[in-house]
Structure formats: structure tokens, C-alpha cells
Amino acid sequence: MEKLTGLRKIKTAVFISGTGSNLKNLIKFSKTKKSPIVIDLIISNTALAKGLRYADQFNIKKKVFNFKNNKINNNNILIYLKKNQIEFICLAGFMKILSSSFIKKFNGKIINIHPSLLPRYKGLNTHERAIKNKDKFAGCSVHYVSAKLDSGRIIMQKKIRINAKDTLISLSKKVLKKEHQLYPDSILKIFN
Ligand code: GRF
């Protein structure tokens, strides 16, 4: 990845599908002096994503692409990103799968946050599976996005202990809190 020259921040889009707590956290981080990125665009696959309100709150451009036709959509998004001179993409709770040609065009420039210690528990319901398997640890990972789901090179991970008393709700909350540290830390690691 290109090294920063000091002044210029990397023009970034965040893709969401839901609540957007990672998005909000990334926006706050992007406004700090040490942040190498500036968030210029928020993309969602649904107008119902609660996180879209942060676009209004922080005065950031937003755009919804419904994924009814995946191929057309991926192309349309690429065109839109180019028009907005987006250089870097952070997926944050984005629930759609991007096409491999899309990923190729942004090779090494799309990252994702996943709520497990990858390669353990790719896909959905990660905490449920960790509890069911009586794992001692859970955590989160930030990784580069590759064509294979949740399989790209890992940038950073954070691990937490699962206590006997932990429920799905308590574990989800604890991991999400760690995610909010991990995502900015990973971005700093990439660009510094
Ligand atoms: C997070 O747990 C993230 O790891 C996963 O989806 C969740 C999104 O949460 N990919 P939020 O929308 O950022 O609050």
C-alpha cells in the first residue's frame, strides 16, 4: 500500500448493511489527526440500514445499491467509486458478497472486519458457534478481502476470554467493543 506523504488522506468508502457501530467508530477515528483515511462515501445495500443516519449526522455522501442484479450492481458501484475517486474500501457489517472482478479491481485495497478469530468461524453466527463449542477464546479479525469468503490475509486480531457466564448477548457486546479498537489500529498498521 502507498505510504502517506504526510498531508494527503486516503479517500475511503465504508460499506454497511446494518447498525453501523463500526462505521460510526471509523468516522470518529477518521477525524483524528493520526488517521491516514478520510471517509468520503458510505455505501449500503439497503435503505433500511440504521447506519445510514451517520451519513446525515457527519455530512458524508451516501448511496444505496440494491443487489437484485449482482453483476450490474458490482459494475455500477465500481463506476460510482471511480467517479468519487475512492481509493480504499472498508467493509463494516456489509452482508453482500462482492464479485471477484470487483475485488480484483480493488486488490489489496478492500478490508473487512469479522467477529471471530479467523480462520475459525468464517461466515455467520460466529459467537453462537464459539459458545456451543465451549471455546475458551473469541475475538475479531481485520483482513484483506479476497474472492473467497472471510479468507484474505489477516492484518490484525484481538482475542478475548469467553467466561462461563457469557451469553450470546454479553459476548457479542464484548467483541464489538474490541472491534472498535481493532479497526482503526489495523488501518494505522496498513498505512504507517
Ligand atoms: C460486526 O460484528 C462485524 O464484525 C460484522 O458485522 C457486525 C457489524 O456491526 N461483520 P455494526 O453494523 O458495525 O454495528
Image: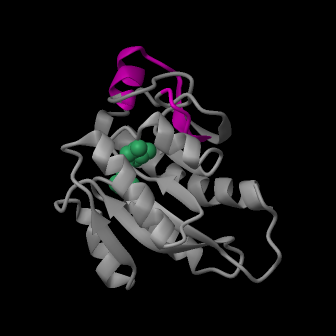
Picture quadrant where residue 10 is located: bottom right
Specify start and end residues of the magenta stretch as a single range. Answer: 126-148
Residue at image coords 49%, 39%? 101
* Magenta stretch encompasses residue 177: no
Residue found at x 38% / y 51%: 75
Q: Residue at x 66, y 34 (%)?
A: 153
The residue closer to the viewer here, 8 or 127, is: 8
Q: Is 139 one of the magenta-colored residues?
A: yes
Q: Is residue 73 left or right of residue 36?
A: left
* Quadrant housing the N terminus: bottom right
Q: Look at the image and tell me whether residue 22 can be seen.
A: no
Residue 111 coordinates in the image, percent (x, y): 56, 48
The residue depicted at 63 percent of the width and 80 percent of the height is 32
**Spot occupied by residue 59 in the image (x, y as percentages of width and height):** 37, 85
The image quarter in which residue 4 lies: bottom right
In the rendered image of this protein, does residue 27 appear above or below residue 99? below
Residue 19: percent from the left, percent from the top? 29, 58
- Asked if 10 appears above or below 115 in the picture, the reply is below
Nearer the observer, 148 or 35: 148
- Residue at the top extreme of this rendering: 133
Colour scheme of the rendered structure:
one colour
Residue 102 vertical position relative to residue 25 in the rendered view, above or below: above
Q: Is residue 8 left or right of residue 66?
A: right
Instruction: Answer with left or right where residue 185 lies relative to residue 99.
Output: right
